[in-house]
Amino acid sequence: MATWGDYAITTNRDANTATIHDAATGARLAVVNVGRTPWGVSAAEGRAYVANFGDRSVSIIDLTTGRTIATAQVGDG
């Protein structure tokens, strides 16, 4: 889980999604498709960065729109 401002972000590894929550109430604001087997998340500057173990990528989510804006492939190792 990661937090930034009013948002808390969790990953859902079996569903290949991340969920954006209202940090104060826990209410679900958005469920966002990301890469395969999302394993961890960090957040900064209005974006969440989801590490996708299953396809060796990082999904970048815009927290204000609740959408994935980019997916970057990462190397082996």
Image: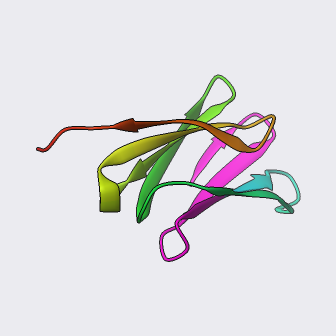
Magenta stretch: includes residue 11: yes
Which residue is situated farthest in the bottom direction here?
Answer: 14
- Determine the image quadrant of residue 57: top left
Left or right, 8 with respect to 33, comes to right
Residue 53 at x, y = what percent?
A: 32, 58
Left or right, 75 with respect to 3, comes to left
- Determine the image quadrant of residue 65: top right
Q: Residue at x 46, y 55 (%)?
A: 35
Q: Residue at x 27, y 38 (%)?
A: 74
- Determine the image quadrant of residue 54: bottom left
Type of secondary structure dominating the magenta stretch: strand
Q: Residue at x 82, y 62 (%)?
A: 26
Magenta stretch: includes residue 19: no
Q: Which residues are magenta?
A: 1-18
Query: Is the C terminus in the top left, top right, bottom left or bottom right quadrant?
Result: top left
Left or right, 42 with respect to 77, comes to right
Left or right, 12 with respect to 39, comes to right
Above or below, comparing residue 55 to residue 2 in the picture: below
